[in-house]
Structures are given as structure tokens and as C-alpha cells.
């Protein structure tokens, strides 16, 4: 079991995923005791006046004819070795007792001498199942005005979550990326000319940001604005995501996850997830170059309390695009959603369909889709319960 760099967490948050945005709408209810459920129907909570984003790169992921559409029964439950095979590293001496010429060794140069040796795997295999050697996490976090408490709860749950992941999964080879839910916020350079005296612009209007800092789906490394880190987060390796060897896992995650509350009121977490794993951002020249790995389990987590439907992709389109980005291998994707809606015990006033499109999206992943109430005060149990889903997915769905 890998006990490396990820052990630096003390308590935790799987995962995936994905915290998605919300507007000026309902936030967490402090008296809610609802627990996370399996995939169901939910929708976002935000302000009704959510404006459209200023970015012009909005595209809707189309669903290809060869994309998977539904997968409500693919959740993994059997933790035993599906092959039932014995140790594959066991080597049988081809010159054993059946060889009539075999003799007791008498001289090192005797050509008839038979010996038994220990064979070393030339690939350097340490015995860790290949299906559990890599996990890629995306957290899509709503950065709208009502999300300060939810962001704090996520950061508080992260250490225990990763500590449990490290204990249960035999690997420490992780990619961990945070994305927010918009491409432009009220506190980016584009807002400076129109409102230079806004509180958050004291930092955000400095000439220190690049194109990726204002691209939805790009890994966050420079959170800016009200309640944000307002500093450049130094990530080991120089990527826009955390990799194996990060010397301060918890501190670095806290830095990139403090995305603040000055985001565009049009929160689009599903769109953020689609773009985060897209070929455009993961390929040559992309902001998230080499984040998504073919053989890794992909864990998407999103968190949002927006009651409106702002995502340009439908639940099915988002599912198809993400599965396509994973090479059509839906069984190696886990989706965790902390959302609003009646299905998870966080209803939005006068919005009975709040969060429904998100719950539909999560449900498409079957047993590997897990949703919980964003309005609860403590996310620890939600993430700790999700570890078993990640573990089963890892063990029972090896790469081809």
C-alpha cells in the first residue's frame, strides 16, 4: 500500500471532483442531518438573476453515437480477485525433477548442474495491482457568493479523506486538480476597468494572471477575489495540479481549493468538469497537460448550491463527453456530488426541480455515482463512505 506523500493529510477531503458553483441563493443548512445517497435526481441552487458568462468559448459537448449512455448497474461490489489465480510471479524451474539429466551441483562450471533461482520482474513490478496504481481526482468547486461555508467544510474533510484513500488503496500515485465553475469572475482583469474599486480587485487587477487563470476547466493555481487565497499556490512539479511527491499535500490543497466567493453567478460545474478532462486542455499546449491518464481511475467531485440550471451541457451530454475523454471506459469513472435538491434533503425554496439535472448526471454512472447534501455541516462521512466505491472501482475494473 502506498504511504507516500499523501499521508501528510490529517483528516480529509474524492474525490473526483468536483465542487460546483452557486449564486446568491441558498447555502448550507446548519440543522440538516441528511446523509449521502446513491445516484438520484437533483439540481442547482443559485440566484435567479444569474447572468451569462463573458467568455465566448462556451461549447456544448455533443453525444457521439458510440458514447455510452446509461450505466445503472455497473457498480463494483465483489472485492475478490476476479481471476482467482495464484501468484503470477511464481516461477517454475523448467529443469525440475522431471529432467533426467538433472544432477546435484558439484561444480559451478558443470553444464549439467541444475539450480533454482529467484526471478526479478524486468518491469520493476512491486506487486501492486496495475489497476490500482493511479488515481486522478478533479474537484469542481462553486466559487459564487454563497459558498464560503461549503468551501471551508470541503477543506476540513480533505485530510481524513486522503488519509483513508492512502490506507485503503495500494498506491500513492495521484493527480489532484481543483477547478471552479466559471471562466470569468467579478474579480478578474476583465472586470477591473468597469469596477476598479471593488474590494477584491485590489489583488485581482494586478497584472499577474495568464490565460489559463481565466479558463474554465483549467486547474486553479492562483485563486483571486473575495474570500480566496489571493496568492500563487506553489505546486510541486510546476503543473496546474498536485502530483506525487507534493511535500505539503494538505496545505497545497487548501490553497488551491480556497477559490473564494466572487465568481460569476452563472455557476456551471458540469461544464467545468467536461472542460477539465477535455482533449483541448489535456493535450499539447493545454492548461492541464497530461493530467488525465489512460490507466488511472478518474474521480470527479463537484460541490454547488445553485438552484438554477446554468450548465450548457445536459446531463447526458456531460456524461458522453466525460466518458469519451476516458476512452469510452465509463467503468473507471467515479462521480461524487454534494448538491442541492429534495432528493438529498436540501430543497430550495420555490424551486422543486433544483439540482435535478445534477442528480440525473450522477445517476448515469450507476453505483459509481454518489450524491450527498451540500447543506450539511460536515462532509467527512460523505467522503469516507465514498472511499469504498473508489476502492471497488479500482480493484474490479483494471485497464485493458
Image (cartoon, grey):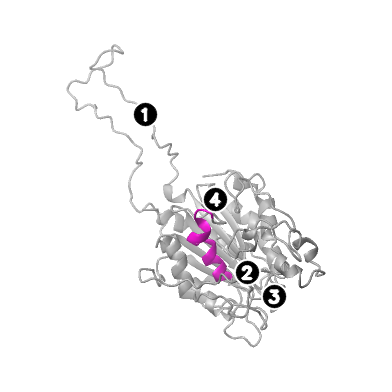
- Write down the residue under mark 1: 118
- Write down the residue under mark 2: 182
In the image, what residue occupies the spot 36% across and 71% down?
A: 65
Q: Is residue 341 above or below residue 187?
A: below
Residue 387: give x, y in percent of width and height.
Answer: 54, 58
Q: Secondary structure at mark 4?
A: strand
In the image, what residue occupies the spot 55% across and 56% down?
A: 288
Q: Secondary structure at mark 1?
A: loop
Q: Which mark is residue 174?
A: 4
In the image, what residue occupies the spot 51% across and 50% down?
A: 169
Left or right, 303 with respect to 69, comes to right
Left or right, 375 with respect to 192, comes to left
Badge 4: residue crowd in 10 Å (few <14, some 14–19, many ≥20): many
State the residue in front, 372 or 250: 250
Residue 14 visible in the snapshot: no
Badge 2: residue crowd in 10 Å (few <14, some 14–19, many ≥20): many
Asked whether 278 falls inside the magenta stretch, the response is yes
Q: Is residue 243 above or below residue 59?
A: above
Reading the chain from its start, which is encountered first: label 1 or label 3?
A: 3
In the image, what residue occupies the spot 37% across and 28% down?
A: 118
Asked whether 209 falls inside the magenta stretch, the response is no
The span picked out in magenta is: 269-285
Cα–Cα gap, marks 1 and 2: 56 Å
Q: What secondary structure characterizes most of the magenta part?
A: helix
Amino acid at each position: 500500500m502506498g504511504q507516500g506523500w499523501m499521508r501528510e493529510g490529517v483528516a480529509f477531503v474524492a474525490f473526483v471532483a468536483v465542487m460546483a458553483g452557486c449564486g446568491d441563493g441558498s447555502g448550507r443548512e446548519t440543522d440538516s442531518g441528511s446523509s449521502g445517497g446513491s445516484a438520484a435526481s437533483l439540481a442547482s441552487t443559485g440566484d435567479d438573476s444569474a447572468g451569462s458568462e463573458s467568455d465566448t468559448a462556451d461549447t456544448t459537448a455533443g453525444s457521439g453515437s458510440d458514447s455510452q449512455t446509461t450505466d445503472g448497474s455497473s457498480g463494483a461490489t465483489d472485492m475478490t480477485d476476479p481471476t482467482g489465480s495464484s501468484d503470477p510471479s511464481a516461477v517454475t524451474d523448467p529443469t525440475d525433477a522431471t529432467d533426467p539429466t538433472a544432477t546435484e551441483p558439484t561444480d559451478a562450471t558443470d553444464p549439467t548442474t541444475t539450480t533454482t533461482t529467484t526471478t526479478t520482474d524486468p518491469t520493476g513490478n512491486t506487486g501492486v495491482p496495475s489497476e490500482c496504481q493511479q488515481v486522478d481526482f478533479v474537484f469542481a468547486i462553486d466559487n459564487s457568493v454563497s459558498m464560503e461555508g461549503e468551501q471551508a467544510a470541503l477543506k476540513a474533510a480533505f485530510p481524513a479523506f486522503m488519509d483513508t484513500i492512502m490506507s485503503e488503496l495500494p498506491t500513492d500515485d495521484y493527480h489532484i486538480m481543483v477547478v471552479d465553475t466559471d471562466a470569468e469572475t467579478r474579480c478578474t482583469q476583465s472586470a477591473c476597468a468597469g469596477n476598479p474599486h471593488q474590494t477584491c480587485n485590489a489583488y485581482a487587477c494586478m497584472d499577474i494572471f495568464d490565460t489559463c487563470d481565466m479558463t474554465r476547466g483549467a486547474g486553479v493555481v492562483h485563486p483571486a477575489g473575495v474570500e480566496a487565497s489571493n496568492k500563487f499556490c506553489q505546486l510541486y512539479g510546476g503543473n496546474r495540479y498536485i502530483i506525487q511527491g507534493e511535500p505539503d499535500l494538505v496545505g497545497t490543497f487548501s490553497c488551491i481549493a480556497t477559490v473564494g466567493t466572487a465568481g460569476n453567478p452563472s455557476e456551471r460545474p458540469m461544464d467545468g468538469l467536461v472542460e477539465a478532462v477535455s482533449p483541448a486542455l489535456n493535450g499539447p499546449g493545454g492548461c492541464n497537460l497530461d493530467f488525465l491518464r489512460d490507466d488511472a481511475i478518474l474521480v470527479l467531485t463537484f460541490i454547488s448550491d445553485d438552484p438554477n440550471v446554468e450548465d450548457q451541457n445536459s446531463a447526458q451530454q456531460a456524461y458522453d463527453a466525460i466518458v469519451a475523454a476516458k476512452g469510452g471506459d465509463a467503468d473507471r469513472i467515479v462521480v461524487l456530488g454534494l448538491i442541492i435538491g429534495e432528493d438529498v434533503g436540501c430543497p430550495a425554496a420555490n424551486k422543486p426541480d433544483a439540482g435535478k439535472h445534477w442528480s440525473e448526471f450522477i445517476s448515469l454512472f450507476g453505483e459509481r455515482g454518489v450524491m450527498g447534501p451540500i447543506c450539511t455541516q460536515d462532509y467527512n462521512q460523505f467522503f469516507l463512505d465514498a472511499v469504498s466505491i473508489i476502492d471497488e472501482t479500482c480493484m474490479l475494473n483494471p485497464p485493458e
